[in-house]
Image: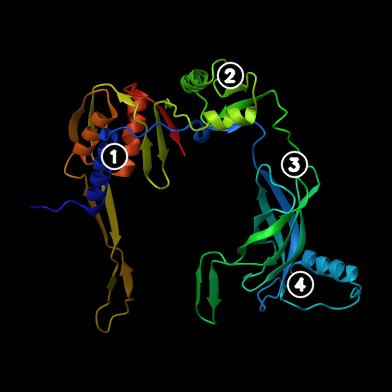
Amino acid sequence: MRRAPKSLTCVTYLLALLALVITAPAAAAPRIKDIVDIENVRSNQLIGYGLVVGLAGTGDKIRNAPFTEESMQAMLERMGVNIRESQMKTQNVAAVSVTASMPPFARSGSQIDVQVSALGDATSLQGGTLLITALKGMDGQIYAVAQGQVAVSGFKAQGAGANISRGVSTSARIAGGAIIEREVPFALKSADSLKLALRNPDFTTARHIARTINMAVPGSAEILDPSTVRLTAPGGSLIDLIAQIENLPVEVDTPARVIVNEASGTVVMTADVRVSPVAIAQGGLTISVAENPIASQPGPLSNGQTQVLPRTQVEVDDGGGASLAMVEGASLKSLVGGLNALGVSPRDLITILQALRSAGALQADIEVQ
């Protein structure tokens, strides 16, 4: 008995697993808080520029990174040290960008994590310490100040003839490394109404959300568009209303869509994908070209020269001929079962789905990433 190729076995297992997931009982409906974002209740991105010191010779080369030298000179001058006329040769300092995400309703004195990334030609931030760095928002205001010992998850070691690395050693993190200095003003308690923004806009889902909220609190929700539901607290507080309705389960409607990633060969299909009865012929064509040159030696006592003669071998494998199969039924389960019977590879599956869409047999949108 001929053994199935490993790639075919993996594809068969993947398609069978997908069919099992499709036929499994439906899970509990998601909550409102998991599918919407509340107006103005969001994170704010912060960024800053700083110096990491204390590196063991793995920092920026001063002559290759002039901004590091200028930053060191400016920092030392603020501390009363003038080195403008000196030649700096240290490699224990690295210029870095510092980024952080300030959560909503963060108060002064709260701590947040920061990400530190090298800007110059530093090879590692291992063992370094970030000096005090101001973190600003898009409005140019300082909202946090960061400082502390950096933690690097990767490493890099090299010698004269070999090197080894794991992860990224030029990126680090400081847990709780920034302290909030300025708050983002937002008076939620005094607001009369706010908007719920759907993360995946859809008319049906927005209608389900508004209906579910109005069943719990009559007259408190209305649909503005497929991505927005306005929330009003009749005779009460919006904070109490949000706490009351955010855990309500809502049925989410998912459009028929096929996501194709050609780089990795990944295909994801939603449960509402439909396919009309269609016949599919799938076959593989492989052409192998091998070069095996040989040397031609001249006869004894002759004036000939040794020559290299080309010898090419060409082999063609059509996969044993194309297989024709009928894919019937309107459900994704039928489509998966039919393609599973063909034993297609991930690359062939992508081609088949695109051909089905062009033929009008696949009732779904295809998104190629």
Q: Residue at x 60, y 30 (%)?
A: 240
Residue type highlighted by circle 1? Leu
Q: CA distance from mark 2 to mark 4?
A: 62 Å
Foreground of the two, 300 or 290: 290
Q: Residue at x 73, y 33 (%)?
A: 187
How many other residues sit within 10 Å of disc 1, few (<14), some (14-19) or many (≥20)? some
> Where in the figure is residue 28, as x and y percent of width and height?
37, 33
Question: Answer yes or no: do the residues labelled 4 and 3 have beta carbons within 8 Å?
Answer: no
Question: Answer yes or no: do the residues labelled 1 and 4 have beta carbons within 8 Å?
Answer: no
Residue bearing mark 4:
62
> Where in the figure is residue 154, as x and y percent of width and height?
54, 67
Question: Answer yes or no: do the residues labelled 3 and 2 have beta carbons within 8 Å?
Answer: no
Q: Residue at x 29, y 56 (%)?
A: 289
Foreground of the two, 227 or 317: 227
Residue bearing mark 2:
220
> Where in the figure is residue 37, as x and y percent of width and height?
58, 33
Secondary structure under tag 3 reads loop
Residue bearing mark 3:
184
Secondary structure under tag 2 reads loop
> Where in the figure is residue 14, as x and y percent of width and height?
28, 44
**Labelled disc at residue 248:** none
Residue type highlighted by circle 2? Ser
Secondary structure under tag 4 reads loop
Foreground of the two, 15 or 204: 204
